[in-house]
Image (cartoon, grey):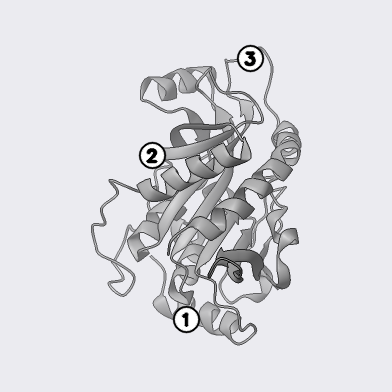
């Protein structure tokens, strides 16, 4: 599950270089960067410089941790308190050869730094035929088909319990807030179940039929290990998928990573607007 001294090394490195102490964070998926550019007074840490932090190798993943501020929470009728935010720009994936412990390292470091809420974003393939390419989907639950779990091995009791409850892996209250924000902004927000697979090959048409049968609406290669680790450490989660392509067998064409990045870029402005409105409303 990772050595707790490794988390402390990373925590000490970050704390010695910034006075910011975010309580909320965002993880940005493939081609979904952009929010970090909106932060005021941002401070960047390259993964390569943070002790033990795995480096992203996937195209479309920036590979840096950014701390900064957004115009934030209302203190009274007239004053806005700036909201301190951490943004993970690019993640490590199991398909890159990383272990589940490495993939979730950043989430655990943020947890011990004091982050209590994380919005996870990802690029996903649409399984439910009512979904459209370029749409946003609020994750209501997940199915872990990666064959890995970041909690396997000896439990670190300082992080969380041996057998954490996952009946509300994605906070019910946060989902209601996300729905309200989407309504206010006029953003269409679908809802559904995210299936996580190992990758890196895209799914076959038969696998997609199987995933639909077991109740999945979208499929991707990330997020679930991180959400498990976050729940373990007591962080409340929300998940947003960008439907960057329709999964195999739904449309009569092949799937490419270029298409995923292209759609991510097209929806980026909508996602950034949504995240900027949602973050200050998450109670931590």
Residue 269 image point, x, y percent? 73, 44
The circle drawn on residue 251 is: 3
Q: Can you say which quadrant of the picture contains the N terminus?
A: bottom left
Q: Are marks 1 and 3 in contact (CB under 8 Å)?
A: no
The span from disc 2 to disc 3 (Cα, nearest Å) is: 25 Å
Q: Is residue 197 visible?
A: no
In the rendered structure, which disc, 1 or 3, sits on the residue that comes first in sequence? 1
Residue tagged by mark 2? 141
Residue at (72, 48) in percent of width and height: 60
In the rendered structure, which disc, 1 or 2, sits on the residue that comes first in sequence? 1
Residue at (51, 56) in percent of width and height: 281
Residue 13 image point, x, y percent? 59, 83
Q: Is residue 247 visible?
A: yes
Local secondary structure at mark 3: loop
> Label 3 neighbourhood size at 10 Å, few (<14), some (14-19), many (20+)?
few
User: Is 21 left, or right, of 149 in this rendering?
Assistant: right
> Label 2 neighbourhood size at 10 Å, few (<14), some (14-19), many (20+)?
many
Residue at (31, 62) in percent of width and height: 153
Q: Are marks 2 and 3 in contact (CB under 8 Å)?
A: no
Residue tagged by mark 1? 8
Of tags 2 and 3, the one toward the viewer is 2
């Amino acid at each position: 599950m990772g050595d707790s001294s490794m988390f402390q090394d990373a925590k000490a490195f970050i704390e010695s270089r910034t006075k910011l102490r975010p309580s909320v964070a965002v993880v940005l998926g493939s081609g979904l960067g952009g929010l970090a550019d909106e932060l005021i007074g941002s401070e960047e840490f390259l993964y390569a410089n943070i002790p033990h932090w795995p480096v992203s190798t996937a195209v479309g993943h920036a590979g840096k941790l950014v701390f900064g501020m957004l115009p934030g929470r209302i203190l009274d009728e007239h004053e806005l308190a700036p909201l301190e935010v951490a943004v993970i720009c690019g993640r490590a994936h199991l398909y890159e050869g990383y272990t589940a412990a490495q993939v979730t390292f950043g989430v655990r470091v943020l947890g011990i730094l004091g982050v209590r809420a994380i919005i996870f974003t990802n690029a996903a393939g649409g399984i439910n035929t009512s979904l459209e390419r370029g749409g946003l989907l609020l994750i209501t639950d997940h199915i872990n088909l990666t064959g890995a779990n970041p909690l396997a091995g000896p439990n670190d009791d300082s992080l969380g319990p041996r057998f954490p409850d996952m009946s509300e892996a994605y906070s019910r209250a946060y989902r209601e807030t996300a729905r309200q924000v989407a309504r206010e902004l006029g953003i269409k927000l679908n809802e559904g179940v995210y299936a996580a697979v190992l990758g890196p090959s895209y799914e076959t048409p038969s696998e997609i039929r199987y995933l639909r049968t077991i109740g999945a609406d979208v499929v991707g290669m990330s997020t679930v290990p991180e959400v498990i680790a976050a729940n373990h450490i007591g962080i409340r989660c929300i998940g947003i998928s960008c439907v960057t392509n329709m999964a195999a067998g739904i449309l009569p064409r092949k799937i490419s990573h270029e298409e995923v990045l292209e759609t991510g870029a097209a929806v980026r402005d909508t996602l950034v607007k949504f995240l900027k409105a949602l973050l200050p409303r998450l109670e931590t």
